[in-house]
Image: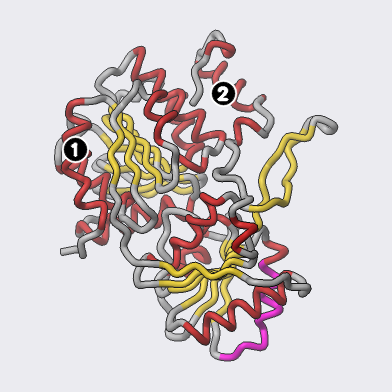
């Protein structure tokens, strides 16, 4: 029997809501268990009239980890009752009742099956990330529900989402909140400017947390180059496994990071580790406060990666990684006064990247009037 999680208390209300309403928004703190507990609960309650439950995850590592965790908790076979499909990889079959997919896969499925005939529920996990393909698939699914499939259930989930606009977009649907947090996380800030380069700051922060906490350390960095330089700065540490984690890392290497080791580990990650995954053993986080975002450059007509500071919502997500399995600590490499000046939330990708791709996808889907198409 899996251990209880905070979101469990909200499941009866969520099930009642989806029996009576075609859509809902679930707000639950980081670590509450929504990703792995909600889909099996909806399946057991018969939500979706026995059709498949499809859950969207923003990243491949999160999709694989969520499906694997559900299989472990329920005693299912991965690829049978629950499965996943990401780019270039599918582990599912005709018996699969819960399918975890990445955003591009869901858009492709909508294009191939415009009415989602075999799908009873679509769950948009971590919707606060507002990736372009997530917004596109949500808008397409809402159009399907409104015009052809009133029986299709839509559920948006997040820890830091402003629920009002999403609930309004989904037909003024109910909002369910789960307030329980699994474990507390102490937040530490740097109290004075640090003149050292970023790798030196990271190494000092990691050593500080290794000395003061019992578990492993997760470090958030903006890109692969910063990961490599931080790894070099930590090379002198003995009896320490320093592991990278980023989107283009091979799947087997990504999965290796999630497993416990016989020695302490430091995981150097981009924002792929920000949501939906639990790295066994992590009780401390060092946050650089930096992220690279895509932004459209009108001078070149192309999207480019731009280095910037995280939002407060992203910083909260990162801190929450330290409290998934035990009380934790998060060290933010910026002063407390600067934190209040950070933007509250991320700007949605739809407001800052090239929209030619989604426009072509909608035309291929058969949408005749792009200007009238409803977006979140």
Q: Is residue 7 left or right of residue 62?
A: left
Residue 119 in sight: no
Measured as percent of width and height from the top left, residue 305 is found at: 72, 46
Q: Secondary structure at mark 1?
A: helix
| Residue 239 included in the magenta stretch of the image | no
Q: Which residue is located at x 51 percent, y 63 percent?
A: 254
Q: Quadrant of residue 193?
A: bottom right
For residue 82, above or below residue 172: below
**Alpha-carbon neighbours of circle 2 within 10 Å: few (<14), some, or many (≥20)?**
some
Q: Is residue 128 left or right of residue 242?
A: left
Is the residue under label 1 in contact with that under label 2 (CB below 8 Å)? no
Q: Which residue is located at x 56 percent, y 60 percent?
A: 250
Q: Residue furthest right?
A: 299
Q: Quadrant of residue 106?
A: top left
Q: Secondary structure at mark 2?
A: helix
Residue 171 in sight: yes
Q: Residue furthest front?
A: 337
For residue 6, above or below residue 235: above
Q: Which residue is located at x 47 percent, y 85 percent?
A: 263
| Residue 229 included in the magenta stretch of the image | yes
**Alpha-carbon neighbours of circle 1 within 10 Å: few (<14), some, or many (≥20)?**
many
- Which residue is nearer to you in this view: 285 or 58? 285
Q: Range of the magenta residues? A: 227-238
- The N terminus, quarter of image: bottom left
Measured as percent of width and height from the top left, residue 256 is found at: 47, 69
Measured as percent of width and height from the top left, residue 326 is found at: 35, 72
Residue identified by numbered label 1: 15
Q: Which residue is located at x 24 percent, y 21 percent?
A: 151
Q: Residue furthest top?
A: 368
Measured as percent of width and height from the top left, residue 336 is found at: 59, 62
| Label at residue 361 | 2
Front position among marks 2 and 1: 1
């Amino acid at each position: 029997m899996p251990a209880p999680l905070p979101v469990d208390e909200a499941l009866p209300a969520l099930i009642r809501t989806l029996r009576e309403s075609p859509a809902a928004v679930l707000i639950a703190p980081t670590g509450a268990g929504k990703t792995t507990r909600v889909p099996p609960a909806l399946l057991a309650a018969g939500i979706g009239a026995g059709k498949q439950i499809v859950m969207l995850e923003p990243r491949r590592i999160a999709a694989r980890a969520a499906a694997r965790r559900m299989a472990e908790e329920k005693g299912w076979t991965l690829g049978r009752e629950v499965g996943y499909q990401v780019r270039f990889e599918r582990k599912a079959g005709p018996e699969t009742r819960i399918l975890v997919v990445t955003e591009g896969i869901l858009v492709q499925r909508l294009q191939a099956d415009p009415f989602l005939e075999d799908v009873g529920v679509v769950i948009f996990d971590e919707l606060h990330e507002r990736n372009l393909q997530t917004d596109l698939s949500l808008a397409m699914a809402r159009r399907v529900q409104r015009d052809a499939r009133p029986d299709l259930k839509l559920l948006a989930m997040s820890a830091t989402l402003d629920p009002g606009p999403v609930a309004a977009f989904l037909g003024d649907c109910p909002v369910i909140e789960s307030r329980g947090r699994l474990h507390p996380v102490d937040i530490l800030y740097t109290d004075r400017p640090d003149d050292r380069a970023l790798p030196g700051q990271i190494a000092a922060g990691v050593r500080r947390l290794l000395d003061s906490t019992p578990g492993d350390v997760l470090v958030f960095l903006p890109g692969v180059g910063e990961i490599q330089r931080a790894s070099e700065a930590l090379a002198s540490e003995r009896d320490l496994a320093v592991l990278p984690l980023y989107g283009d890392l091979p799947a087997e290497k990504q999965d290796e990071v999630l497993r416990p080791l016989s020695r302490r580990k430091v995981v150097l990650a981009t924002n792929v580790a920000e949501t939906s995954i639990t790295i066994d053993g992590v009780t401390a986080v060092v946050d650089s406060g930096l992220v690279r975002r895509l932004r459209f450059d009108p001078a070149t007509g192309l999207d480019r990666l731009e280095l910037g500071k995280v939002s407060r919502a992203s910083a909260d997500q990162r801190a929450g990684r330290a409290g998934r399995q035990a009380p934790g600590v998060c060290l933010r490499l910026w002063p407390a006064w600067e934190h209040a000046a950070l933007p509250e939330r991320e700007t949605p990708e739809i407001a800052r990247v090239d929209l030619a791709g989604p426009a072509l996808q909608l035309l291929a889907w058969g949408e005749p009037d792009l200007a009238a198409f409803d977006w979140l």
